[in-house]
Image (cartoon, rainbow, N blue to C red):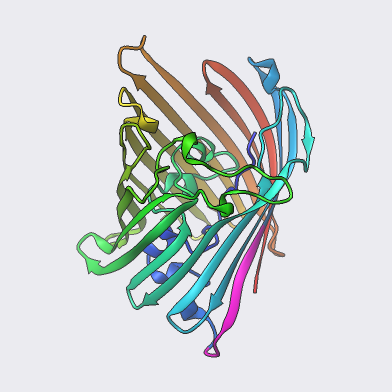
Amino acid sequence: MNIRMTPVPHGAATGVTALGIAFGLALAPMSAQSAEAAFPSVSGEVGFEVQNDFNFESEDPNAEQNELGMVIEPVINLNLSRNVFVTTGMTLEAVRDPGPQEDRVFQDHGIFVDTLTLNYEQDDFAVYAGKFGPNFSIGYDAAPGIYGSDLLGDDVELAEFIGAGGSLGLGETGLGNLALSGSVFFLDRTFLSESFITNRGRTNLAAGGAGNTEVPESFAIALDGEAVPGMDGLRFHTAFARMGVNNADTEYRATAGADWAIAVDDDLTLTPLAEYVRFWNAGGNGAESRNYMTLSLLAETGPWNVAIAFTGKDVDVDNANGSTFDHQTQISAGYAFANGFTLDVGYKNATAANQTTQTLGALVTYAVAF
């Protein structure tokens, strides 16, 4: 079981990502524009997580296991000037799946570079080049709870691509504060695709997959909006991606989603989220289409949060006997301590390949900025 970075419900994910840039340069908390006037300078943040997942009951006996692991994500900015900076993002996590019925305690962890970009920002304009995660979905990052983004993170998230991109703020409109972003890329097959301590292996062209081409044949474009007039707390996102596949059919993806932080009163905020994602020619298979639907609700009062999330994945293959439907439901609750630590506990019921697994988990997070 992969232990993945789970966004803390009380804040945005760390790092300068394409999605962060698209929502406005102010959402990139470690950009050169926020650095001190003296250059060069260094700023950043390190996120820490410790998570335990206990698969206590499964229709697949091999899936019954317990895993205790950690995720450490340092993001470092070398600020060369007020407008130019280099971002390096790394991840330390379990880089191999456990074997059948294998219990693990901080095993098979490796560290790899997930982001390495040269960035330029000026007012509402930004460009970047290097290794990054293209702006496509919000659900994999924003679905709340310990497990809210699991299914999307495995399938929908675009990560570890090499190329270039940028964003342009369109300013205040009748639909809110809008930003248009785009990028061109292909899958990282350099030494940066490997991991250290435990080596996950180097990506190669023969492995195939979406975006894995000899030259940049893939692109993504997205429109993001927030500060919608009369709908405080609403943000929306729509995107389209063309994913080149080596010696196979081109995959296409489209998504539309939104979440809305609704202040019920001074103490209670409810944030519903909905996102739909569609794949055509999934993974280069011209006969396969996929549909993903994520629905969630986050309730926050003071330091407490409660999250419910559901994701369904429908896979349809032409000339096959029907379609498959994987799905998962999670419920979790958490508390944010005054010292910066958060503690969440949760339950997940996940069905894949017609086999259901039940999981209990606990997650502790902490972040340090510098």
Does the segment drawn in magenta span residue 45?
yes
Residue plotted at (30% across, 53% down): 222
Q: What's the residue at 32%, 50% (across, down)?
A: 219
Image quadrant in which you'd find residue 340 = bottom right
Q: Nearer the viewer, residue 219 or 253?
A: 219
Estimate the x, y position of residue 232 in percent, counting from the top left: 35, 60
Query: Where 169 sits versus 41, above or below?
Result: above
On screen, 185 above or below 68?
below
Residue 8 appearing in the image = no
**Image quarter of the N terminus:** top right
Apparent side of residue 36 relative to residue 23 in the rendered image (left or right): right
Q: Is residue 12 visible?
A: yes
User: At 52% across and 18% down in the image, what residue appears?
Assistant: 353
Place of residue 221 in the rendered image (x, y in percent of width and height, measured from the top left): 29, 53
Q: In this view of the protein, which residue sits in the foreground, 116 or 37?
A: 116
Give the residue furthest to the bottom.
Answer: 38
Residue 217: image x %, image y %?
A: 32, 47
Secondary structure mostly seen in magenta is strand
Let me know if residue 19 is in the magenta part: no
Residue at the image position 39 percent from the left and 44 percent from the top: 213
Between 190 and 364, the residue placed more toward the observer is 190
Residue occupying the far top of the picture: 321
As drawn, 266 above or below 158? below
Tell me which segment is drawn in magenta: 37-47
Question: How many numbered circles does the render carry?
Answer: 0
Residue 154: % across, % down: 51, 37
Quarter that holds the C terminus:
bottom right
Quadrant of the rendered structure where residue 41 is?
bottom right
